Amino acid sequence: MPKHERGIIVEDIEQLAEEANDLLTECRESVDEYIAFARISATTEQDKQADEWAEKAIQLIITNLGNTDMSVVGISALIERIHAAGLTLLEYNFDAMVREKFTECMA
């Protein structure tokens, strides 16, 4: 592969990684940004499955812990931990996307 083509590939991969990092930063700064990004990135079927999963998760929490254990602070702690888990998953997905692009370019 000519040197100038490798430079273009490296620039493409760097740009993809930078865009992914910018999105991750925005999603870290705000739960609302994370939700908006996730929802806009999903297909209708993925969105439906996500809503069903969330409903089941809430029902399991209520069933296992009961309504009496809920508090504003408890809900905020749960949101914080779910947001952190979502960011970890998002970061993993972005890393995989950049690696896949690199592999495609090197093939």
Image: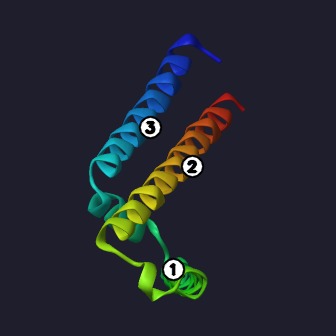
Q: Is residue 25 above or below residue 35?
A: above
Residue 41, quarter of the rendered image:
bottom left
Amino acid tagged 3: Leu
Query: Which residue is denoted by mark 3 in the rendering?
Result: 16
Q: Quadrant of the N terminus?
A: top right
The quadrant of the image that shows the C terminus is top right
Mark 1 residue type = Ala
Q: Is residue 97 above or below residue 47?
A: above
Q: Is residue 72 left or right of residue 8?
A: left
Q: Is 6 located above or below residue 86 in the figure?
A: above
Where is mark 2, residue-wise? 93
Q: Residues within 10 Å of mark 2 (few under 14, many from 20)?
A: few
What kind of colouring is applied to the model shown?
A: rainbow
Q: Which residue is mark 1?
A: 54
Taking depth in this image into account, of 98 and 9 the one nearest to the observer is: 98
SS assignment at label 2: helix
Q: Amino acid at mark 2?
A: Asn
Nearer the camera: disc 2 or disc 3:
2
> How far from the left and from the top, in percent, is residue 45?
55, 83
Q: Determine the residue positioned at 34% across, 64% down.
A: 76
* Number of numbered labels in the structure image: 3
Residue at the limit of the structure toward the front, as seen here: 68
Q: Secondary structure at mark 1?
A: helix
Mark toward the viewer: 1 or 3: 1
Q: CA distance from mark 2 to mark 1?
A: 20 Å
Badge 1 vs badge 3, beta-carbon distance below 8 Å: no
Nearest to the observer: residue 73 or residue 88 = 73
Provide the secondary structure element on which disc 3 rests: helix
